[in-house]
Amino acid sequence: MPDPSMTPEGFGIGARAPRKEDARHLHGRGCFVSDIHMAGLQDVAFLRSPVAHARVVSRAKPAGHEANVFFRDDLVGVAPIVTRSAMAGYKLSEFHPLAAERVRFVGEPVAMCIAASRAAAEDLTERVEVDYAELPAIASSAAGRAPGAARLHEHWPDNLFLETAFDSGIDAVAATAPVKVDLTLSCARQVMHPMEGRGLLCWWDHRAAQLVVHASTQVPHLIRAGLAEVLNIPQSAIRVAPPDIGGGFGYKCLLQPEDVAVAWLALTRKTPFRWIEDRREHLVAGANARQHDYRLTAYADQRGRLLGLDAEVMVDTGAYSVWPFTACLEAAQAGGNLPGPYDLAAYRCKTYSVATNKPPFAPYRGVARPGVCFAIELTIDAIARAVGREAWEVRAENLVPAAAMPYTNITGKRYDSGDYPASLLTARDMIGLPAHRAGPARDAQGRYLGIGFATYTEQTAHGTKVFAAWGLPLVPGYDQAFVKLTPDGALEVKAGIPTIGQGLETTLAQIAHEMTGVPFDTIRVTLGDTATTPFSTGAYASRGIVMSGGAVSRASEVLAGRIKAIAAHLLQVRAVNVTFRNGRIHAGAASLTYADVAHAWYARPEQLPDDVDTAGLEVTEGYKPAVDTGLFSYATHAARVAVDTETGQVEILDYVIVEDCGRMVNPMIVEGQACGGAAQGVGTALFEECPYNDDAQPLASTLMDYLLPGPTELPSFRVHHTETLSPHSAHGIKGVGEGGAIAPAGAIVNAINDALAPLGATLRDIPANPDRVLAAIAAARHGAA
Amino acid sequence: MAGHDGGGCGRVTTSWRFVASMKPAPFAYTRAATIAEAIDLLAAEPDARLLAGGQSLGPMLNLRLARPTRLIDIKRAADLRMLEADSNRIRFGACWTHAEIEDRTIEDSTRGLLPHVARGIAYRAVRNRGTVGGSLAHADPAADWLTTLAALGATIIVHGATGARSCPATTFVQGPFTTALGPAELIVAIEVPRLSPAASWGYEKICRKTGEFARAIGAAILDEPTGLARVVCGAIGGAPIELPRTAARLAEAGAAAAAEMVADEMTALCGAAPWQVHAVAVRRALAQLAVPAGVTRDLPARPAAGAA
């Protein structure tokens, strides 16, 4: 566990402040979308396509219920979701809120039914008659790229949303490198599974003349813009007010068909409607992510020094391009991040974003990096095996050294700070590699033991420059925050970013407390409601604490200056002599409360200085880091596993996380992010998979088929922190939200392969489930025979 | 269910169709206070289904995979919670829960086998409601009780409109989700023979997650004073199978010798190839027989994290 000496007293930046959110959540008094009750509320259920690819031949509403059943043509004035991008060669898709003439994945909404209860609405969906003429289905990236493949979007010449190529020149290296390693790898399709699925409740506020949208969303201000566009109404006529949100992970940073359809209902009927996603809809129709295929050739010298990497990456992007991040964010991130934390001199990479008959691909915690980390980390281990050295040694010699910082890598990413090799060596020592190597290869039960490592960088809070280069419809710029000293001397903080479980109500209060000295327990943080908060593009890309935290810091700093000016006047001292301490305002031996200063502004203006700042005790400020190409957090994960070679079961015996996210605002919350992300990464490594058959029918439609790791499948993650401040951001903070999820697949599969080395078996596909482990062992046995 | 509480109350009928939080297709609901009532209701309505703990049926209702016209709730039928014991056997009603067996609320006559198996079923919240009878009637091939009761030589007591009958646990299940139950019949009790103090058992459940339905189950019981030696393999897609040759070898030459028979007998009984993991489960169950009598066993402890 972290060194407690790193923890300062109190509630400022760096303190292990208890979370403000926890009181309501631990008492079961949070308020999520489905906790909201309104008079006249009607439930919505969607009839979804049972086939992966078909023409809709006919559709009929049940007699007597015509007014409660909707097809696409009923949604008058609604445009399809079309996500534009400036990337050259990118192709547009039209995603209709309810299917138009074609359906392109199992689960695509075809009809919408409303009733007084969800059960009754589902009863109605069963009575809607739709006839389909099936078309050939594309069930994989490879099938989508095959010559003569059926086309998903009839006006396209192929099935590629986008094809990219990067080449720094690799032919010379390929011709001369003494070591060459080929790998073919794959990552399964996954679903995100926040504890709360998606959902929204919409109603019409006659007094404000606004459509009010209580959506479980990571991006309320973006959703407002997106809804305005497809509903063709002004943004001012929409208020997005998220309630509590039970996790997002990327799934909730999109505008989805159900959102549009339900918003349209409330807009046109002027009564409240809600849709709450169920777990089967989540599994079959939403939140798809992670599915990559890799073909890699790595070149190295005889010590294992990486000389070049030649890569082909296919992303199975599903049927439509999601709004606003497109179908191509994943491949863009994959191509850019595949070199990882390594010093790589020659790199060629082709990416293919392949349209398939599956739900649209969405950005999931880590966005492409869990896949590329898995790919490059298995490559490093394969090189080490080829040159006969320990993987950690080869890894250490290839990592960008601390002395090279700041370092611009081969794809132009600017690694701002850190000591990557040090994190690896610390992880090696914590996991006990020397003792492991000196000990037996098998445990008392006969299981094979192994240790694996994965080191990664996490580009966090990447902003304007990065997103503008991707040409997305909405480019994040300055995030804003509002702070106000209330008449009784408390502090209100408001920001447009929502709280999705990441503890921002606590950490933003810590930053405001650090800057103003106002007691932590009197700071109230309000987030996400577009009617009451300044603009933020939202909670994604590990940006919240950097961007909104920076904005709160900046606004608080300005407010602190105004508080000091008034306090100085009241105390008849100079403002530079005023300090904040122990919840009071001091100058020499004299002191005031925050209420004294607030009272002067609000109630006793005759006490104010003549030159008082007339903007008063409320401030809105915007912020982005001085360099907005991203702040690079990093970590090394190390896993020690036992592999039962008779059953194929893998147990994680020990797991170490050595991470550096710059200045930690609250180490306890950083640990929560690291462990929660790593838990999802264990799912990626060992459990989670959405298989499809050749007709693109999903084979996992319940949590009996789709296995999530539970508490007993997870190790007790041991987290070690270091703090290398970013030179570019307020307080040296870097983001941390995604990192934990990036490395587990790499570390765990490397550990499995280390354990199976005596058998000559290697795994190349995840999840490393028992069947794959047994198949790898059998393949090695056949290969040896 | 609020408003209808009260053990021993008469038949309660209500409609749950418009309870806002529910997702199932419409069904009627009746609570049966006795076995006889439940049989009457079943006989009167062919598409009615019994509801005990609801741990499998509940999700199937919400997914609309099960669409009964009526649910007959038998959880509060007092005679389904009967308990009788003599020196040879224990007979317990079908609506005792996994948790009650885990907690030994019912006397354990199996030297810890039944509590051990109970504790490995799903997680505690499921065990608190799920019943032994419900699990047997649902007949998921990968569920624990089928294999366990077959290994113990237990008997399943069934009542129907034409009276009572007994089914050996070994033949009760006829295929995946298919049992020997006829129309308007229900499981009322399970009768388990007592093991002698010298008996030992092995139970190996291979599953990907704690409490998950099994991928393979091996069960072995050796009770030399009574001459009982039985070896059963479960989670093979239908009814569990007995391995009589392996069991005979166990009785005459011990567990290690028996383990060498397993793979061949599995192949002989089930065909080749996909039973590798099942054979492992059976061999590991046999290996557990070496544990000295009297040693209490529990689920395998997880290695401490950080142990190098």
Image (cartoon, rainbow, N blue to C red):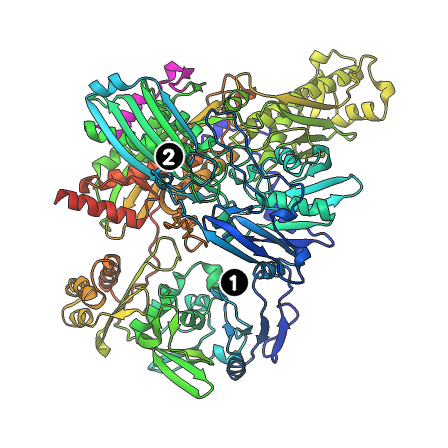
| Residue at the image position 45 percent from the left and 18 percent from the top | A416
In the picture, the quarter occupied by the N terminus of chain A is top left
**What chain letter is assigned to the residue under label 1?**
B
Percent of width and height locating residue B11 = 60, 79
Q: Quarter of the image holding residue B293?
A: bottom left
In the depicted structure, whether residue A659 falls above or below residue B109? above
In the depicted structure, whether residue A432 falls above or below residue A304? below
The amino acid type found where label 1 is placed reads Arg
Percent of width and height locating residue A660 = 44, 27
Q: Decide which of A692, B110 is in the foreground and name it.
A: A692
Verify whether residue A389 appears in magenta: yes
Res. B64 mark: 1
Q: Is residue A61 visible?
A: yes
The amino acid type found where label 2 is placed reads Met
Q: Which residues are magenta?
A: A388-411
Q: Quarter of the image holding residue A157?
A: top left
